[in-house]
Amino acid sequence: MTTAARTPSTADIRRWRRYLADERAEAAVYRDLASRRQGEEREILLALAEAERRHEQHWVTLLGERAGKPLRGDLRTRMLGWLARRFGSVFVLALAQRAEARSPYADDVDATPQMAADEQVHEEVVRALAARGRQRLSGTFRAAVFGANDGLVSNLALVLGVSASGVPTHVVLLTGISGLLAGALSMGAGEYVSVRSQRELLEASTPNPATGSALPHLDVDANELTLVYRARGMAPDEAAEHARKVLSSLQPVTSPVPIAPAETGDEHEAIGTGWSAALSSFCFFASGALIPIIPFLFGMTGTAAIVVSAVLVGIVLLGTGAVVGLLSGASPLKRAVRQLLIGYGAAAATYVLGLLFGATVG
C-alpha cells in the first residue's frame, strides 16, 4: 500500500518528523561548510544543501498539518553542525560522508527511490570533497600521526621493559629520555630522506618542458615523437596516431610546446616537503614519547608509575586512532580500539621480556 493510500500511524508520523528534522539539520551543515569555502567546492556544498531541502519538502508534504513544532536533528547531525560552524575542515566532511552512508531511505517505503538514490550519490560527492582535504593533509599529517603513535608505543614498551627488569627508577627515566631523543631524531631524519627521495623520483619522471621546443623541427616521416608515446605505454599504432595529431596541430612557431600535461603538482602536494615532514615527525614522536615518562618525571615509582604511564598512553592511543578513523571515513571507535590493542600488545610483550630478563639476571 502506498503512503498516499493509507492512514499514517503514530509511529509513521514520529518517524517522518525525525526525518524532517534530520534533513533540515543536514542542509544547515552543508550551508555552514559552504560559507567557509569558495569556488567550485562552495557551489557543490550549496547544491547538496538544496538536495536536502527537496527531501525536507517531501516530509513536509506527507506530514501536512501534523508537522508540529520543529524537532532538533539527531545528536550526530547536531554535533556535525557544531563542528562545521567552528572548523569547516576535512574532519567534518569525513563525518558527513559517514552520515550519508547511514541513510535509511533505501529500506523505508515512505521515501521515494529518487531520495534513496540521492543519498547514495551524496556519499560519493562528500567522499570526493573529503579526499581533496585528505590529499592536502596527507604528507605532513601522515608524519605527525604516525610519529606520535610510534613515540607512544616504542617508549612505553621501552619504559615498561626496563622497569620490569628491576632497575632503579632514575635508570628508567634516563632510558625513557634517551629513547625519546634517539627516536625523534631517527624519525625526523628518516622522514626527511623518505620524502625527499620520493619527490626526486617524481621530478625524474616529469617530462622536460624544454623538449617541446624541438617538436616543430622533427622529421615528420621519421616521427621520433612516436617513440616517446610508446615508451609511456601506448601501443605502436596508437602512439603513431597520437604523434601525428600532435605534429599536425603545430603552428610554424618556435615557442615550446608541451608534450604532456603537468600532472605532478598534486602528487608533490600530497607528499609534502621534506623539512615539514621531518619537523612534524620529530615533534610528534617526541610529544608521543614524552607521555610514558610523565609519571617518572613527577617522581612516581614501581607499579603505580607503570599503571599511570600505561593509562596515559592508552588515552592518547584512543585519540589518535579515532582521528585516523575520522579522516579515513571509517568508524572512529573501531580504529581507536584497534590502535589501543596494537599499542598495548607491543608494550605487554616487551614488559614480559623485561620480567624474564630481570629474572635471568637475578
Image: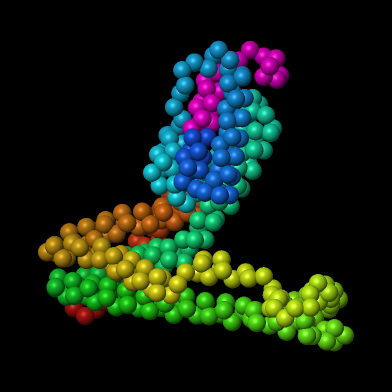
Report the front residue among 196 and 8.
196
> In the image, is residue 36 part of the stretch drawn in magenta?
no
How far from the left and from the top, in percent, is residue 261?
67, 70
User: Which residue does the image show at 56% across and 66% down from the upper left?
Assistant: 266
> In the image, is residue 19 part of the stretch drawn in magenta?
yes
How far from the left and from the top, in percent, is residue 10?
54, 15
The segment highlighted magenta reads 1-25
Vertical placement of residue 271 versus 200, above or below: above
Report the front residue among 169 and 274.
274
Vertical placement of residue 241 versus 17, above or below: below
How far from the left and from the top, in percent, is residue 267?
56, 68
Vertical placement of residue 17 versus 6, above or below: below
Q: Residue furthest left?
A: 299
User: Which residue does the image show at 61% across and 48% down from the upper left?
Assistant: 124
Number of numbered labels in the structure image: 0
How far from the left and from the top, in percent, is residue 1?
71, 19
Main SS class of the magenta portion in the image: helix
The reply, left or right, for residue 140 in relation to residue 223 is left
| Location of residue 166 by image quarter | bottom left
User: Which residue does the image show at 64% across and 28% down from the upper left?
Assistant: 111
User: Which residue does the image show at 72% across and 81% down from the upper left?
Assistant: 254
The reply, left or right, for residue 214 in relation to residue 135 is right
